[in-house]
């Protein structure tokens, strides 16, 4: 598939670009700062993939629906699909993906997935809606996986921290081989109940997956108080991920998560999947805002 031309959004001096391929947010310049990282295959070859209809890994890269095995791998298929532009203006775009022969070969459900990006002077809002247009109950998960420059406001990577709105449990699941979620937990080195210092060692043992997080918002804070504020609506899980030495921090918002170790059940029985009734719609929203001087 040829790479489609990215769509440019502009609001005053702020700009953002979104690609119809995967409805992926590719760039965001706000208050003179470029906030999204530029892909580098040496570390990671994406910028901000859309995750649907699963978040994380499925066991052996497959899912089961009504006893039939489908090849549904890491984070689903939306990031590889070409969305159509349903509506657009100078500062917003709404993209639409409908089920098609390729998606039905991986996930046998009829759906409409809309992802809207809306730019303002200091913020970008993302609203996703998932509609079940089939006759049966549809299990799904949705997520957004943006990688932000780290550092983004000068200084060293160790000058940065993540501050959650609420105290969080200082432990996360161990990620087992194949990306599966172990029942074992490992400690997270919080400075206090809400503040997580950051450096390369933070991610030596894979992503930090805060399942059923207490916080609906957090701040990625740099030196001098410059901060990226993230607010989430209808996302129970927060994932922080990077690779040691990589100049990015992914702040991911998920409704679902990877298969548990040993899981061999139906997709509908996978923990944290949303069961959407025929004709029903799920809504998930995010707001990213640059704060401070």
Image: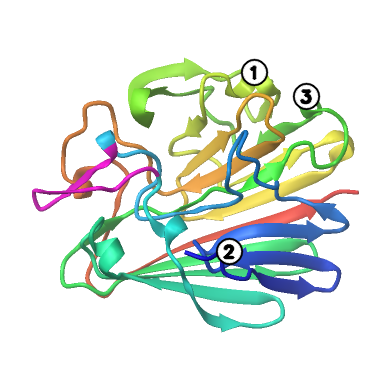
The image shows a total of numbered marks equal to 3
CA neighbours of label 1 inside 10 A, class few (<14), some (14 to 19), many (20+):
few
Quarter holding residue 256: top left
- Spatial CA distance of label 1 from label 3 is 10 Å
- Which residue is found at the position 81% from the left and 59% from the top? 30
| Residue at which label 1 appears | 201
Asked whether residue 190 appears in the rendered view, the answer is no
- The single residue placed furthest to the front in the displayed view is 2
| Residue at which label 3 appears | 158
Query: Foreground: 284 or 182?
Result: 182
- The single residue placed furthest to the left in the displayed view is 67
Instruction: Give the residues in magenta.
Output: 61-74
| Residue at which label 2 appears | 126
Residue 7 vs 90, above or below: the answer is above
CA neighbours of label 2 inside 10 A, class few (<14), some (14 to 19), many (20+):
many
Is-magenta flag for residue 65?
A: yes
């Amino acid at each position: 598939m040829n790479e489609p031309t990215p769509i440019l959004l502009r609001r005053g001096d702020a700009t953002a670009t979104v690609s119809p391929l995967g409805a992926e947010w590719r760039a965001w310049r706000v208050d003179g700062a470029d906030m999204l990282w530029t892909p580098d295959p040496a570390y990671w070859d994406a910028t901000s993939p859309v995750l649907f209809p699963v978040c994380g890994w499925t066991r052996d890269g497959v899912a089961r629906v009504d006893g039939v095995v489908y090849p549904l791998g890491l984070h689903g298929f939306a990031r590889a699909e070409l969305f159509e532009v349903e509506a657009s203006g100078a500062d917003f775009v709404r993209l639409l993906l409908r089920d098609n022969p390729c998606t039905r070969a991986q996930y046998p459900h009829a759906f409409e997935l809309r992802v809207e990006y809306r730019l303002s002077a200091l913020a970008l809002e993302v609203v996703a809606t998932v509609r079940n247009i089939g006759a049966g109950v549809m299990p799904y998960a949705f997520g957004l996986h943006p990688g932000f420059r780290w550092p983004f406001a000068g200084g060293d990577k160790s000058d940065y921290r993540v501050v959650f709105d609420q105290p969080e449990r200082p432990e996360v699941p161990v990620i087992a081989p194949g990306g599966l979620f172990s029942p074992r937990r490992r400690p997270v080195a919080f400075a206090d109940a809400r503040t997580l210092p950051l450096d390369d060692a933070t991610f030596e043992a894979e992503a930090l997956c805060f399942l059923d997080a207490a916080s609906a918002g957090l701040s990625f804070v740099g030196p001098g108080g410059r901060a990226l504020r993230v607010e989430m609506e209808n996302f129970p899980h927060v994932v922080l991920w990077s690779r040691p030495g990589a100049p990015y921090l992914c702040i991911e918002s998920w409704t679902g998560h990877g298969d548990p170790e040993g899981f061999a059940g139906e997709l509908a029985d996978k923990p944290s999947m949303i069961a959407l009734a025929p004709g029903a719609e799920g809504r998930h929203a995010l707001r990213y805002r640059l704060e401070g001087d």
